[in-house]
Amino acid sequence: KAGVTQTPRYLIKTRGQQVTLSCSPISGHRSVSWYQQTPGQGLQFLFEYFSETQRNKGNFPGRFSGRQFSNSRSEMNVSTLELGDSALYLCASSLAGDYYEQYFGPGTRLTVT
Amino acid sequence: LAKTTQPISMDSYEGQEVNITCSHNNIATNDYITWYQQFPSQGPRFIIQGYKTKVTNEVASLFIPADRKSSTLSLPRVSLSDTAVYYCLVGPPGAGSYQLTFGKGTKLSVIP
């Protein structure tokens, strides 16, 4: 069974630009969650999608948005990038959204200059 | 999820057994203890989960004393490939992904 895949793996953007990250969950998984991980703040929850609907949202500004398609693939978008958005963005999928049943992807390393 | 405390870093030589302890004084009756492993620039990976006493799988063992206020992840005969950050989480099995948060974890460095 293929794991969670994320594209791209690495990305360099400049301040003010926008970026779209993609996540393909494990086949059959309907829940996709996104996390931001930084050395200073650790892992922080961004949002969760289940069957194309946003089910939960973390405490991030509106510049961070996401969506899920009918095949469960998900994208997240960050507009008007700031230096502080530099981080590892992780996507995780699961059948129902339980935290310990999630499988994580390798992440997208975003660097904002 | 409950607050946990674990050492920031640990060093070990190859072939030794490594024990990483996590304190969780405010663990609730229905909370489980879960450990994750994360390699650099990779997503976290579930290692083991337990409720009480001892749990063992092909990767590690988890020891939980009767009062459940702490737990110890035991990695037998570590190799260089076990160099990673290990996170301890405490929470109910029904907790959603939105409740998942990692702190700094324990950075394990295995020395040849």
Image (tube, grey):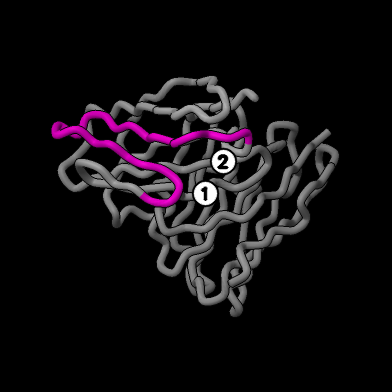
Mark 2 secondary-structure assignment: strand
Which label sits on residue B45? 1
Q: CA distance from mark 2 to mark 1?
A: 6 Å
Q: Which of the 4 image quarters holds residue B22?
A: top left
Q: Earlier in the sequence, mark 2 or mark 1?
A: 2
Q: Tell whether position B58 is magenta.
A: yes
User: Is residue B19 shown above or below A4?
Assistant: above
Decide if residue A17 is on the left or right side of residue B105: right
Residue B74 x/y as whole percent: 39, 34
> Residue B94 appears at what percent x and percent y?
29, 57
User: In the depicted view, which residue is nearer to us: A71 or A56?
Assistant: A71
Amino acid beneath label 2: Gln
Q: Residues within 10 Å of mark 2 (few under 14, many from 20)?
A: many
Residue A36 in the image: above or below residue A84: below
Quarter where residue A66 is shown: bottom right
The answer to whether the residue labelled 2 contacts the one labelled 1, judged by CB atoms less than 8 Å apart, is yes
Q: Is residue B61 visible?
A: yes
- What's drawn in magenta, residue-wise? B57-80
Residue B17's disc is none
Marks 2 & 1 on one chain: yes
In the rendered image, the vertical position of residue A100 relative to residue B36, given as above or below: below
